[in-house]
Amino acid sequence: MPIPPEHTGRFIYHFTHLDNLSGMLTNGVLSPNEQKRLGLGHKSIALKGIQDRRSKMKVPCGPGGVVHDYVPFYFCSLSKMLLSVVNAKNVDQMFLIYFAIPIRILERPDVVFTNAAANTAIPPTFFSDPSDLGKLKWTLVDSKKWTLADEEQDRHRMAVA
C-alpha cells in the first residue's frame, strides 16, 4: 500500500553511536538480531532494561518475530529516548549520528510500525499497512518539545517504525 498523501513528505529517524557508522556503511542498517546473527560488533547506546523487553516483545503483523528483528526508527525528530541517552551520559552528544529516511520505506512488506513506543511491558499496537498511519497521534509526534505533559503522551510521541 502507498503512503497516504498527507504523510508523503515525512521522514523517520534513527540515531546511533558514531563508532557504528563504518559497519553501517559496509553492512547496511541492520536489526539488533541480524547484527548478532552475523557476529557484528555494535556500540549500543540503549538502556539495557528497555532492550531486554524489546528482544522478547512479539510483533503480531507483517513478517512477525520480535521487535529486535527490526531496525528501530522514530517518527518524531525529538525523542525522549535521545534526550535520555544524552542526559544519562551514555554517550557524548558529539558522538551521536542521526539519520532521516523518507517515510516511503514503510511501503516495504518487511516493515512494521507502532502507535507508541515499544519500550514498556505492555506492547503498543503494531501495523504493517501504511494506510494505518492515520492512527498515530501526529500532534504529539510533531511536537517540538523534548518531553510532553505526561508519560502516556511521550509514549505515543515515540511511535516507531
Image (tube, rainbow, N blue to C red):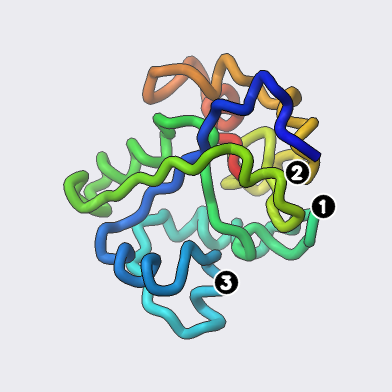
Q: Residue at 40% of width from left, 18% of height from top?
A: 144
Q: Residue at 81% of width from left, 40% of height from top?
A: 1
What amino acid is labelled 2 in the image? Phe
Q: Residue furthest bottom?
A: 39
Q: Residue at 51% of width from left, 83% of height from top?
A: 38
Which x, y percent locates residue 27?
Answer: 45, 73
What amino acid is labelled 1 in the image? Cys
* Mark 1 → mark 2, Cα distance in angstroms: 7 Å
Characterize the local packing of mark 2: few (<14), some (14-19) or many (20 or more) Cα atoms within 10 angstroms: many
Q: Mark 1 or 2 closer to N-term?
A: 1
- Asked whether the residues under the numbered discs 1 and 2 touch, taking CB atoms below 8 Å apart as contact, a structural biologist would say yes
Residue that mark 1 sits on: 61
* Mark 2 → mark 3, Cα distance in angstroms: 19 Å
Q: Mark 3 or 1 closer to N-term?
A: 3
Q: Quadrant of residue 153?
A: top right
Which x, y percent locates residue 89?
Answer: 22, 48
Residue 71 left/right relative to 2 = left
What amino acid is labelled 3 in the image? Asn
- Asked whether the residues under the numbered discs 2 and 3 touch, taking CB atoms below 8 Å apart as contact, a structural biologist would say no
Residue that mark 3 sits on: 33
Q: Secondary structure at mark 1?
A: loop
Front residue of 84/71: it is: 71
Q: What is the number of the mark on residue 126? A: 2
Q: Residue at 30% of width from left, 57% of height from top?
A: 17
Q: Secondary structure at mark 3?
A: helix
Q: Mark 2 or 3 closer to N-term?
A: 3
- Asked whether the residues under the numbered discs 3 and 1 touch, taking CB atoms below 8 Å apart as contact, a structural biologist would say no
Q: What is the number of the mark on residue 110? A: none
Q: Is residue 122 visible?
A: no
Characterize the local packing of mark 1: few (<14), some (14-19) or many (20 or more) Cα atoms within 10 angstroms: some
* Mark 3 → mark 1, Cα distance in angstroms: 18 Å
Which x, y percent locates residue 51?
Answer: 51, 59
